[in-house]
């Protein structure tokens, strides 16, 4: 089985303001009447192609917190993007390490042979790469999104 992990901000959609975790943890940071989250067409195109593969679990691995997940899903739904699983941060003081949350996903989906990851931030890419050193039998492919 393959895990296809997608970040939200500046990977699937261009975030229309400077990223600030304090603001991004608030529902109004995702209000579609206030902000225009423009889709990043290349990443969306790839998502749609991968989503058709029944051997792949497509997961949103976002550093938005769980209390704003419904607002994130509203934006995704506007663009007909439906994930198999959503992995936000659990609460304001939750673990912001995408690598640590990937470990939980690897425990949840035991038969993973490959992880492919789309992300715009080097710190998250490095976090995932470091964690994956502990899983030498799982192939890792990183796709750095630049806008």
Image (spheres, rainbow, N blue to C red):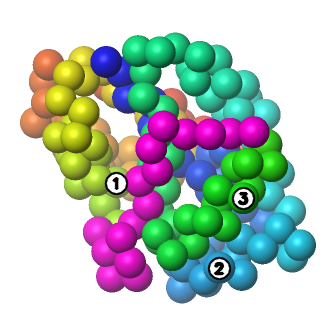
Q: List the residue tagged with mark 2.
A: 27
Label drawn at residue 37 = none
Residue 135: image location, x then y, percent = 13, 30
On screen, residue 73 above or below 132:
below
Identify which residue, 123 or 91, lies in the foreground.
91
- Mark 2: give few (<14), some (14-19) or many (20+) Cα within 10 Å: some
Does label 1 or label 2 sit earlier along the sequence? 2
Name the secondary structure under disc 1.
helix
Rendered position, 48 above or below 88: above
Asked if residue 146 shows in the view, the reply is: no
Q: Secondary structure at mark 3?
A: helix
* Real-space Cα separation, disc 1 to disc 2, in angstroms: 21 Å
Mark pair 2, 3: CA separation:
11 Å
Q: Residue 74 shows which numbered tag? A: 3
Q: Which residue is mark 1?
A: 98
Q: Residues within 10 Å of mark 1 (few under 14, many from 20)?
A: many
| Range covered by the magenta-colored residues | 80-95
> Which percent across, then down, holds residue 7?
53, 48
| Residue 92, magenta (yes or no) | yes
Q: Nearer the viewer, mark 1 or mark 3?
A: 3
């Amino acid at each position: 089985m393959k895990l296809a992990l997608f970040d939200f901000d500046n990977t699937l959609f261009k975030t229309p303001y400077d990223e600030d975790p304090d603001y991004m943890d608030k529902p109004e940071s995702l209000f579609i009447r206030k902000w225009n989250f423009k889709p990043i067409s290349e990443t969306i195109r790839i998502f749609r192609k991968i989503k058709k593969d029944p051997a792949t679990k497509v997961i949103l691995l976002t550093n938005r917190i769980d209390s704003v997940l419904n607002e994130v899903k509203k934006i995704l739904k506007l663009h007909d993007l439906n994930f198999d699983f959503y992995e936000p941060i659990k609460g304001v003081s939750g673990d912001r390490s995408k690598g640590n949350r990937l470990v939980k996903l690897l425990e949840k989906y035991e038969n993973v042979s490959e992880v492919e990851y789309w992300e715009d931030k080097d710190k998250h890419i490095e976090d995932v790469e470091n964690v994956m050193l502990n899983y030498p039998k799982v192939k890792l492919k990183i796709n750095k999104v630049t806008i």
